[in-house]
Image: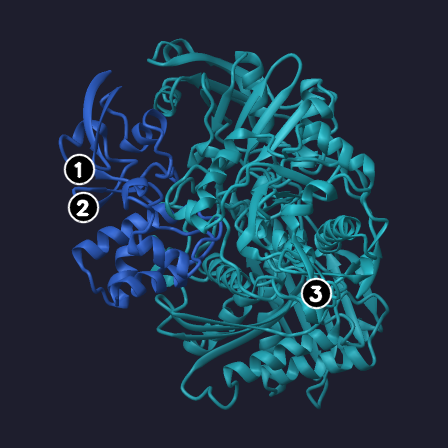
Amino acid sequence: MAIFNLKINRKEFQVDVDPSTPMLWVLRDHLNLVGTKFGCGMAQCGACTILLNGEAVRSCITFVDSVGDKQITTIEGLSENGDHPLQQAWIEHDVPQCGYCQSGQIMNAAGLLKANPHPTDEEIESAMNGNICRCGTYTRIKAAIKTVANS
Amino acid sequence: MTIVKTTFNRRSFIKSSLLTGGGLLIGFNWLAACNTADATRGQTIPDEWFKINGYLKIGENGVVTILSPNPEIGQNVKTSMPMIVAEELDVDWKNVLVEQAPLNTAIFNRQLAGGSDSIRQSWPGLRMAGASARKMLMDAAAKKWNVPIAEITTELGILYHKSSGKKTSYGEVASAAAQLPVPKEVKLKDLKDFKIIGSSKKNVDGHKIVTGQPLFGLDYKKDGMLIAMIVHPPAFGMKLKSFDATEAKAKPGIKDVFSIKTYNDDYKPQWCDTTSFTELVAVVGNSTWEVMSAKAYLKVEWEPFADYKVAMAGWGGDQQITVPAGLESTADHNVKMKAAAAQTGKIERRDGNPEEAFRNAAKVIERTYTAPFLAHTPMEPMNFFADVTDDNAVLVGPIQSPEYMEKTLSARLGLPLEKIDIQMTRMGGGFGRRLYGHFMVEAALISQKMKAPVKLIYSREDEITFGIYRPAYHALYRAALDANNNLIGFHVKMGGVPENALHANRFPAGAVDNYLAESWAIESNISVGAMRAPGSNFNAVAEQSFLDEVAEAAGKDPIQFRLDLLKRAKENPVGEKNDYDAARYAGVLELVREKSGWGKNSAGKNRGVAAYFCHSSYVANVVDVTGDKDTPVIQKVYAAIDCGIVVNPDAAINMTEGGIVDGIGQAMYGQLTFTKGQPDQDNFDSYRLVRHAEAPKEIEVHFVKNDIHPTGLGEPPYPPVMGALANALYKATGTRYYHQPFIKNSFG
């Protein structure tokens, strides 16, 4: 066990966990930020996507001892009032079915738009290809991202 | 208006009062706490609630809370079921809050997510719940104003007495209404007066989902809660022999390691129980990562089991199931299926003289279709919270079949049903997997042993390798054409491991004079269960691919060929037991033909068509494909659907889009294979699901408009698109696709 000081959603947190603990479980079990989801545990589905200094990463393979002083953003901290343009577009397009993968989809899209504010359809498909939606809401996810990219 | 007798009685309301107490229906604080976020939708939470009936309560300010009875699995019933209540109650949807109901068999009918039946079976009950509450509010207003109830009208939560100009809100008379007797009969709205049903309403959990609030079973927490995981045999055909937990127990945060038996030895399993892996090793600790890590240090010995028989309580009485010994491989299954298909099967339906028709045929077409086992892989892995004491059990989590699992839990824990409280969380998908709730029993047994609240979590590998799969299927189709290319004989022989997919009385039964349907099955110890549109999810692909080929051999347009058969089935059906309505079937084909511009707008397009009937609904698809056989691109999918009245149109389109994407993914990539009893795929690096770039570029959905009471929609859009895809791929590549998955070695 070791003490880690983490910067998450513009706040400071301290946790005492094994250094090999993935951020996914630090967030979910130790900090009660359960919006970041467990899907596969091996960076194959994207349900656990968070932003690390603005870049989308898979928290299930991002170990707590590798984070240092980088800024972590989770779905809970993407906006103050749940009104990030992507969150609004997701509601406008009524994207979710079961909803489980959607926080990971939104966080991955946030990473994409930060790096490339006006992606083409192909760039959206390529950037989002690591995020599985088992319910098959892909066409709505793409439409929601395009709404934000075109605004 | 329609006048119906209500099926509520005072007893059910009394029971609901006892359950919830104090006039408040909130019986589970964690879930109720989530509702404060609904303030973001503009509602002001009332200071006081008045319970009108088991489905709803009204605040003094007119805000209405409606309980959604059925499990929410992504099919959006948590929005559409309350919409139906709100319609008959005649309130403004803006003033409605929705809560997930707990399991309560005294108030609610069939709290099950399965069979695409939530709306279909609850349609009358939900309407009555709203209409009877409205009548009680009208009665209260009539008494207050001392006027006949017949002179009271309502509109959007306001009661009017037009001749005197009096008006009052539901909130103002809710207290009085809650004291009144439940009406013996109520008037339901005319369909033409619907305001909420038929207008698109957004997902009631949408804001919570996009802001990451706790909604799912995996998100559930309670103080003092421990985390548990299970270790199951690595292969079907194996059972637990012994284990050494010395090293695992010494790992940080680990509380205990022990074995559990899911059922008592003399227990007769129900349909929602499982035959596979009923003795497990449980690892319990403080946190998920500690438990996951410790699992690797557990030393377990497994041993093969001998043949055994299970008496299972099924829908049609008890069934003797033989679970054979052995470590099975896909290669062996394929050899056995080929041999079985060459034998005569069990005759399930016979019309006319099929043997003679085939003897006299000018042309006989014979084709074989296969599909592999599939895993359900809902995105939220199996999990459940349990807090079991000597006196009662509280279970919270994602389950499609709570009413049935309560019985299993009661038998295993030795607790009466009323001492078991099941609360349903929003489910991160299910697709049938969460009908089989062994994980609830496992969580309960672990909690019982630990004398502490426990959340059981499966890893993705646990979920994919535990069983309850879509069976592996095989179908042999034969068609006889006469010299004028008329279809004079049709023969289907369906089999599978360990079940077949035959629906003997579905189209084209009823449309062909000489028809033969046979079935067979091969015993297996690999456990299977319902997966989205069971049976249909193979039939539609095989049958609709075959009909395409028969139409081609007959020199006919594939849509017209089907319509001609349906015309025959409508005007002069063969046999008496035909499951489908030929006119509605033809209706969706005609609609998809019109909307896709079939024949007119087809030049230069690789188009395939298919149509299928299941879960009381009809769906036809046209699929347009470009690209080559290794990297096909699905440009557009058209869907025409007849599911009766559409409650929530945009959500229905969403579900249809999802079914289409799911169908395309399963047909192209879905495959679970076995080597010596062990699944060859165990996570998303090897078990392939459809991804963003492979989804259709465009999906266009059209519903047939009619006044038929709603039928199924969760499953029907899934099967036919696979057939339409196979037929479009043939146009694009010149190759027929007989064996799923269509894209081989996709991990290349």
**Mark 3 residue element:** strand
Q: Three-letter amino acid code at disc 2? A: Gly
Q: Nearer the viewer, residue B77 or B494?
A: B77
Give the Cα distance between marks 2 and 3.
57 Å
User: Which quadrant of the figure has residue B271?
Assistant: top right
The residue under the point 71% across, 89% down is B483
What colour has chain B? cyan
User: Which quadrant of the figure has residue B716?
Assistant: bottom right
What residue is pinned by disc 2?
A54
What colour has chain A? blue
Quick check: marks 1 and 2 in contact, CB under 8 Å?
A: yes
Question: What x and y, as percent, mark residue A68?
Answer: 14, 30
What residue is pinned by disc 1?
A71
Compared with A66, B734 (above or below) is below
Give the Cα distance between marks 3 and 1.
62 Å
Residue B28 visible in this rendered orientation of the protein: yes
The nearer-to-camera label among 3 and 1 is 1
Give neighbour class at mark 2: few <14, some 14-19, many 20+ (Cα, 10 Å): some
Give the Cα distance between marks 1 and 2.
8 Å
Q: Three-letter amino acid code at disc 1? A: Gln
Give neighbour class at mark 1: few <14, some 14-19, many 20+ (Cα, 10 Å): some
